[in-house]
């Protein structure tokens, strides 16, 4: 029987943190799968030049200073209290006035109604007296812990990244390429419902586009949710663990293209299982019941 769905797109995002409201995308990868043959037929990856998403910057500078403190402060080994290092000073929650004043100046000079600072402008800001604040805002959008987890860093983004507008056009073109008539691709990935998809929706909104208009709105296959239904007593449902259960080994995990290729193989295995491929079929025949009343 021919599948009513023509393509699925398995994807993965790497980001500057867990907060879609201000953490930036760093790297994305996509693998298109033919739903008739269950074969990977296309792939695309893109890394994005740094950009600061400051759409959630608080209107009141002191409130924004407290938000930055909340997100980036660390425990001081000497006092045991949380501090934020700014201009070589360790600031406590009650010492944020210098940071607050710089935020007020930054907003007046550079935001002026906009919410995104692209890399070229970021570089120019880093050549001014507001360099310490620019670096702090960079760490807010690209948390050092996220960089450590993925192995991606600022220099890598500069060397391999493209402007976010170029990245957007490549992503949009990939989804349109795998749309056939009214059949939009099914979206799949590991934990995409709660993580990757919201990041994609936010990224598309920067260009006043609705990501959901590019995918099948009624079908989303989150392989994390599948895994929890199949192996409900496992200690971990990470992609590496569940893929290993079906004989797939991930290589160089936490890089978008490697995770996506592994996830695509896992998706195909699960779909084959659902379709009964490789499973011995019984000779069961449905019998009609005659009811005697």
Image (cartoon, helix red, strand yellow):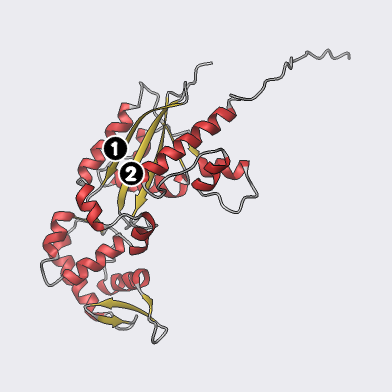
Instruction: Residue 79: name its quadrant.
Output: bottom left
**Badges 2 and 1: C-beta atoms under 8 Å apart?**
yes
**Residue 20 placed where, x, y %?**
36, 54
Residue position for label 2: 28
**Residue 194 placed where, x, y %?**
46, 49
Between 205 and 123, the residue placed more toward the observer is 123
Residue 148 in the image: above or below residue 168:
below
Mark 2 against mark 1, which lies toward the viewer?
2
Image mark for residue 290: none
Residue at image x 29%, y 60%? 141
Between marks 2 and 1, how big is the CA–CA gap? 9 Å
**Residue 195 placed where, x, y %?**
43, 50
| 37 lies left or right of 108 | right
Q: Classify the position of the N terminus by image quarter.
A: top right
Give the secondary structure at mark 2. strand
Residue position for label 1: 171
| 50 lies left or right of 259 | left
Instruction: Residue 24: name its quadrant.
Output: bottom left
* Number of other residues with Cα within 10 Å of mark 1, as a class: few under 14, some 14 to 19, many 20 or more: some
């Amino acid at each position: 029987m021919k599948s009513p769905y023509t393509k699925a797109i398995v994807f993965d995002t790497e980001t500057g943190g867990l907060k879609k409201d201000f953490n930036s995308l760093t790297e994305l990868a996509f693998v298109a799968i033919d739903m008739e043959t269950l074969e990977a037929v296309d792939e695309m990856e893109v890394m994005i030049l740094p950009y600061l998403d400051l759409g959630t910057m608080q209107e009141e500078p002191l409130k924004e200073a407290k938000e930055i403190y909340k997100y980036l402060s660390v425990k001081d080994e000497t006092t045991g209290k949380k501090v934020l290092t700014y201009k070589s000073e360790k600031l406590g929650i009650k010492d944020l006035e210098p940071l607050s004043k710089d935020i007020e100046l930054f907003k007046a000079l550079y935001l002026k109604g906009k919410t995104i600072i692209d890399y070229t402008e970021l570089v120019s800001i880093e050549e001014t007296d507001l360099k310490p604040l620019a670096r702090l805002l960079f760490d807010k959008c690209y948390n050092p812990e996220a960089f450590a987890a993925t192995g991606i860093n600022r220099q890598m983004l500069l060397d391999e990244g493209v402007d976010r507008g170029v990245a957007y056009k490549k992503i949009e073109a990939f989804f349109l390429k795998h749309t056939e008539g009214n059949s939009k691709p099914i979206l799949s990935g590991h934990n995409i419902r709660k993580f990757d998809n919201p990041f994609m929706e936010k990224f598309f909104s920067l260009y006043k586009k609705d990501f959901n208009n590019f995918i099948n709105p009624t079908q989303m296959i989150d392989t994390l949710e599948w895994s929890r239904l199949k192996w409900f007593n496992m200690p971990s449902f990470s992609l590496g663990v569940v893929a290993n259960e079906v004989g797939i080994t991930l290589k160089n995990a936490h890089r978008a293209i490697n995770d996506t290729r592994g996830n695509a193989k896992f998706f195909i295995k699960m779909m084959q299982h659902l379709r009964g491929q490789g499973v011995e079929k019984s000779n069961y025949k449905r019998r009609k019941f005659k009811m005697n009343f």
